[in-house]
Image (spheres, grey):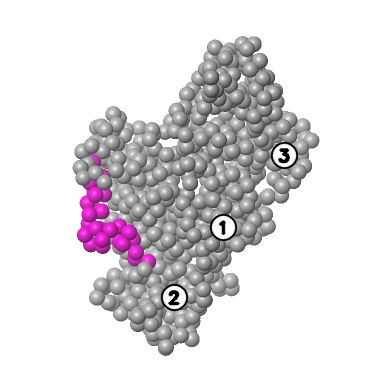
Amino acid sequence: MKESTDTLALSQEPWLKPYATHIQERHQRYLLALQGLADSYGDVVEFASAHQLYGIHWDPIRRGWYYREWAPAAKALYLTGDFNWWDRRSHPLKRNHRGDWEIFLPYETYKDTFVHASTLKVVVIGANDTELDRIPAYIRRVIQDPESHNFSGQLWFPNHPYTWKTKTFQPRHKTEGLFIYECHVGMALEEEKVGSYAEFAQLILPRIHAAGYTAIQLMAIMEHPYYGSFGYHVSNFFAASSRFGTPEELKALIDDAHALGIAVILDVVHSHAVKNVYEGLNEFDGTPDQYFHPGDRGYHEGWDSKLFQYGKWEVLQFLLSNLRFWMEEYRFDGFRFDGVTSMLYEHHGHTDFSDAERYFDVGVDQDAVLYFQLANHLIHRISPDAISIAEEVTGMPGLARSLEDGGLGFDFRLAMGIPDFWIKTLKYSPDEHWDMFGLWHALTNRPAGEGTVAYAESHDQALVGDKSIAFWLMDKEMYHQMHIGSESLVIDRGIALHKIIRMLTLSLGGEAYMNFIGNEFGHPEWVDFPREGNKWSYQYARRQWSLVDNEHLRFKYLFAWDMAMLQLAKVAGFLTSGQSLVQHHLDADQKGLVYEKGGYLVLVNLHPSKVWELPCALLPEGPCS
Amino acid sequence: MGVALCTFARRPLQLSLSSDEERFGGFGRDQGLLDQVWQVGKEGQHLLPPRVMQIFKRLEVQT
C-alpha cells in the first residue's frame, strides 16, 4: 500500500484532477481506518470476527454454551425457548465487562434441553420500555412455524459438520472470463413450489455448467421473512434461508458448483434491512439508532426498509463480519453488493449527476464509502481472487479501481445502463428508428480501467410490471408460435433480435457478462412471487425448463445460440484479452455496425428489411483482403 | 495475414437469424467456408441480410 496519497493514479486522470483533493482525502480516511483497526484489533480480518464472539457458541474450556448480544441501550434481556419451556424470565443475561449482554449455559445442566433443532428467542426490555420477543442478531438459522407463521431462532448443532468434497477452489475469472448466471433457488424449478438447495444442486447446476457459465450469483440466501421480497428484505444476516433447506444443503450446493468449476457469488444485501421488529434488527435495544440511522435518514421510502448507520464501529463490524462469515463458513467466492448507489449517497442517487462535483460533495455518505473500501480490502485479504461487484448506477469515479489507485476496490460494476437502453429501445423505438449511435454509446461508454459486468437483462427487468426481453419482443405470440414449423414474422424478428442483443452486449458491454436464469433460452412472461394480489400463486415464480427441453419448440435454438456465444467469447477472450475495441463502420440509416474485438471482426445488420452491401474499402484487412 | 472464418452459421453468407434455425447453435472452422468467404471478399463487397450478425476471425499465418 502506498504511504503517500499524493500520486494516486485515479486523481491523476485529467477529468478528475479538479477533485484530486477529494480522492486523496477519501483514500486517507481509508488508510487511517486501516491503521486504527491494526492498532486495536491487529488487522481488518480480526476486526471482522464479531460472529465468533456474538451469538451462540460452544466454549470447549468451560464446557457449555455462551450467548452474547450487543444491545447497549436495552434494560434487560432474557433467553427463552424450548430449552426452558419458553419461560420469559428464568434466564436473564448479564452485562459483561465489555458492556455486552451474556449468559452461560453449562453442558451438564442443559445437555438434554439445549439441543440441535430446538428453537429460541430473546426477550428484550428495550430502552423505550417495550418488551418484545426478538431473534438473536447473530443467529445462524431461523425457521418459520407453518401454522402460526411465527419466526424463531433455531439451534443448529449437527452431529457431523459438513465435509467439503472440493478442498480448494479459486475462481478462474481472470483467465477464463466471468460469465455469471444470476439465479434464485426458490424459483429455479418448473414445479409451482419453493425449490430447495438440494434440488438446485441436482437439477439446475448441471444445466448451468453445460451452458458454459463460470459463476452463479445466488439471490435471496440471507434469511428474509417475506418470500415475495425476492430476498431483499433481510432480517437475519447470518442465517441462510431455511425455506430452501439446511445449512449443509447450501454448502453441498456450493461444493457441487466448485466441483464443476463454477464460482459462487452471494447477492449480499447490506444496503438496507427489513423494518420488522419481531424478525429483524429494527429497534433491537429499544432505540431507533442501534443499527440504523434515526429518523428519516434511517428509512428508505422506495424500499420501505431500514438504512444502516455505517459510521458506527459496531455496525461496521457487524457488516464486515457478515462478509467474512459467508466466505469462510459457506465458501462463497465473492459478493454482488446490492443497492450500492443508495448507500453511497444520502440522497440515494436521486439527484442530477451532470456535474462531477456530485461524486464528492456533501451528498456522499463518506461512512458508506469507507465501508466499501474496508469490505473490498477484507474480502481480497481472505481470498485474493474473490469477486466483488457493485450494483451502482451513477458512475462513481474509481468504484471498480483498486484501493491502491485511490478507488473503492470493487472488481466490477454492473452496467445498469445497458439493460435500461435495451428495454427503452424495445418499448419505444420501431425497428427502423433504432438509435445506432445511442446503442454504441450505451454499450461502450464506461470508465477505462474499471471492470464492468455487461448484461441485457437481470432479475430487475423480469419483475412483475415489466417482462423479459423475449416477451417484449414476441409477447403473446410465444404461446402459440414457437413451434419449429411456425411461420410467424413476430417470432422470426424476436428470435433474431434476442440473439443479436445478447451478442452485442457480451462482445461490447464489459469485462464480464451476466444472464438471469432462463433468459438464455428466452423464458417468456415475467417473475411474480406468491402474494395476496395473485392469490399466492407460484405460476410466475418458477422456470419452465420444459420449453427449452422440447425438441419441437424454438427455445432450444436460443439456448444453442447462447451456449455457442459463450464458447466463442471464451475462445476469443472477449472478456479477458484486454484487446482494444475498434469500430470500423457505423451507419445510422442502414442500421449497420462493424467492429473488431479480440481478433474477431463482427458485422451486424440491424435493419429490418434491407440487405447490406458493405464496400470492402470500409473493412480492415480481413474478409475482403 | 490470412483470414479464418468463425461463424455461428453453417452458411455464413446466407445467415439469417430468423429462420434456418437448425443450422445455428454451433460455430466451427471449415475450409470450405474459408474458401467461400475468401472468394466473396475478392468480389469487392460483403452481403449482410437483415437482422444478421456475422463474425470473422483474423488468423495470423506463419510465412
Q: CA distance from mark 1 to mark 3?
A: 30 Å
Residue drawn at 59 percent across, 38 percent down: A567
- Check the residue under mark 3 and report the chain it is in: A
The image's mark for residue A588 is: none
Mark 1: which amino acid?
A: Asp
**Disc 1 target residue:** A256
| Residue A577 x/y as whole percent | 47, 34
Decide: is A159 above or below A501: below
Q: Tag 1, which secondary structure? A: helix
Estimate how packed mark 2 is, as few (under 14), some (14 to 19) or many (20 or more) residues with alpha carbons within 10 Å: many
Q: Nearer the viewer, residue A91 or A261?
A: A261
| Residue A571 x/y as whole percent | 55, 35
**Disc 2 target residue:** A121
**Disc 3 target residue:** A554
Please report the bounds of the magenta region as a residue range.
A24-51
Q: Nearer the viewer, residue A114 or A366?
A: A114
Mark 2: which amino acid?
A: Lys
Which of the marked residues, 1 or 3, is nearer the chain's N terminus? 1
